[in-house]
Image (cartoon, grey):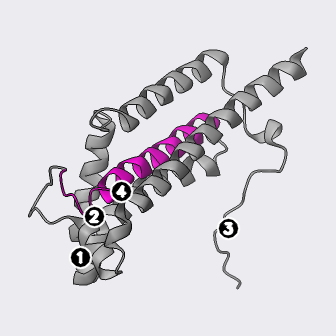
Amino acid sequence: MQRSTPEFRFPDDDPAADWPPLSGAVLGIVLAMTGWVLWQALTGDQWVPVLDGANLLFHEAGHPLFGIVSERLTVYGGTLAQLAFPLVVLAYFHRRADTLGTAVSGLWLLENGLNIGRYLGDARAQALPLVGNGEHDWTEILSRWGMLYLDTTLAALLRGVCVLGMLTILLLLCWQWWDKRQQEY
């Protein structure tokens, strides 16, 4: 008797067949919300209300969860957990070829990267308010790697990649919507 194992399959190569485009109204809402999130994440105190609060909860929960495995992993657990939850949500929606769910969870993952970049860039200055025992994760991580002097450079690189990723998702959504409109005429 042969056991079958679950298989992860990508939707067919034809995006029009498997990935329905968003309606114009939904696309407009996604564009507006992403614009607002980017504005919040890149200006002022660089904090996105509600969203970054939820991200912080996942971050803080990750420290003890990864600490169970190894005390050395505790410091990495916050960032890993902060990324893991949106990745799981992204995989869920991608598996179902859900355009809106995949796009929004991808945007959420990348917004997390903006938030992590903010924290990473503060490793030397330590000006951000901290939760818990007051130790700065990225100061510890970068010190372990002998890269503390690169905190702001790495943060800028991460944030740049995340902004480009978010813009790419938006461009793909717009292209998909436009392509569908052209097929209808």
Residue 145 % position (x, y): 36, 80
Pointer 4 with pointer 2, Cβ within 8 A: yes
Distance, label 4 to label 2, CA atoms, is 7 Å
Q: Marks 1 and 2: CB-CB under 8 Å?
A: no
Image spot of residue 168 (x, y percent): 64, 41
Tell me the SS state at disc 3: loop
Cα–Cα span, label 3 and label 4: 26 Å
The label on residue 62 is 2
Q: Secondary structure at mark 2?
A: helix
**Three-letter residue code for mark 2:** Gly
Is there a contact, CB below 8 Å, between mark 1 and mark 4? Answer: no
Extent of the magenta region: 99-127
Using residue 166 as the reference point, say whether residue 111 is left or right of it: left
The residues bearing labels 1 and 2 have C-alpha atoms spaced at a distance of 8 Å
Based on the picture, tell me whether residue 39 belongs to the magenta stretch: no
Query: Taking the image as drawn, is residue 66 in sight?
Result: no
The residue pinned by badge 3 equals 7
Where disc 4 sits, the SS reads helix
Q: Earlier in the sequence, mark 3 or mark 2?
A: 3
How far is disc 3 from disc 2 in space, using C-alphas? 28 Å
Q: Could you tell which of marks 1 and 2 lies nearer the N-terminus?
A: 2
- Which sits earlier in the primary sequence, circle 3 or circle 1? 3
Residue at screen point 66% across, 26% down: 22
Q: Quadrant of residue 149?
A: bottom left
Residue farthest to the left, as pictured: 133
Q: Is residue 14 left or right of residue 125?
A: right
Q: Is residue 100 magenta?
A: yes
Q: According to the image, label 1 marks what residue?
A: 67
Within-10-Å neighbours for mark 3: few <14, some 14–19, many 20+: few
